[in-house]
Image (cartoon, grey):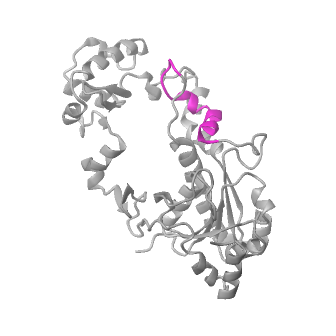
Amino acid sequence: MAGPLQGLKVVEIAGIGPGPFCAMMLADMGAEVTRVDRLVPGALGGGGTVVDRGRRTIAIDMKKPGVTELLLRLIDDADVLIEGNRPGVMERLGLGPDVCQARNPRLVYGRMTGWGQSGPLAPAAGHDLNYIGLTGALNAMGSRDRAPTPPLHLVGDLGGGAMMLAFGIVCAVLEAQKSGKGQVVDAAICDGAALLASTYFDSLARGKWSPQRADNMLDGGAPFYRCYTCADGKFISMGPIEPQFYKLFLELCEIDDPLFAAQWNRQDWPAMHEKLEALFLTRTRDEWSELLEGSDACIAPVLDFSEALQHPHMQARNIFIETGGVVHPAPAPRLSRTPAEAGAVPKTGEHTVEVLQQLGLGEAEIATLREAGAIA
């Protein structure tokens, strides 16, 4: 059964990180995504991973004569364009939003950057860690006695970038269906990561947020919301915030120490933390899981990626699938009537001739492009 975005045509100008992830999300949901790849991969690779699943790919040298007009013909029939270059690059290629939307007024032009299309940092290079560093989010992560811990690229590139771009694109497409007019989606990772931290900025405004890492409830400061080392060197995650869940945790662990009676007495948190550290060292991670996992005590093992593949809950929900011998996460979220579907992972440039033929190019024109080095 086709996904909810069936019929939506997307042109993706190949990039790294959040742009491809956004395009994967749209493709999973049924959009027809055509990716414009480089003939020569960039420093960080050129596709062929599970994030590239579900779309067609053409490999082309965008700087060769005549290629810009060719790409404009591809964009003429598209609903969405995704690009992740620095501000001004697409304009210099003759593919900026003014040019594209003059030819295709209903085009939604999605722009993915770290700093955004405007502002003093807009032209500068950067990566995930830099973008979330500017928002305050990075400073809140990690131990209090060392530098902040990089949270993979989940908070910036993917959460603050790719998902915000996908949301903005779908919003703009829905509006275009009513107005007949497209618009530019300026998705900046620093914008999105800041938005994800809304709860913490609210706490700051109310005087309930400490700038000291590991001094707040959700950053590891609370002894009942953090990870602990077990007897085998593996870890357990603990999170019984609500009083009834906290009480159940104490009962299941047979903790009757009066120190733990006042859950929210911050002065007692260091001592509670120290005693819980000693407690969790008395059993292995799996022994603690056997006792507590699945109860309302809010305890779960901390698994590595390989272990996550084998967990009964993950398997029961088919959270992981296999494509081309690679096991990877299935599309999310789950729709009851028009479910998403993960497509095959294409080889870079696999559909070049097919797409050019659909644009009306004959064998002679395709041969000319090949001889000119515009396509492989």
Return the x and y of residue 257 as percentages of the image width and height. Answer: 24, 13
Return the x and y of residue 28 as percentages of the image width and height. Answer: 47, 64
Above or below for 372 versus 48? below
Return the x and y of residue 347 as percentages of the image width and height. Answer: 51, 67
Residue drawn 40% across the image and 60% down it: 334
The answer to which of 267 and 373 lies nearer the viewer is 373
The answer to which of 216 and 64 lies nearer the viewer is 64
Write the start and end of the magenta stretch as one range: 127-146
Return the x and y of residue 330 as percentages of the image width and height. Answer: 39, 58
Above or below for 281 versus 110? above
Which corner quadrant holds the N terminus? bottom left
State which quadrant residue 273 falls in.
top left
Residue 328 in view in this figure = yes
Residue found farthest to the front: 371
Residue drawn 67% across the image and 85% down it: 361
Residue 362 in view in this figure = no
How many labels were placed on the picture? 0
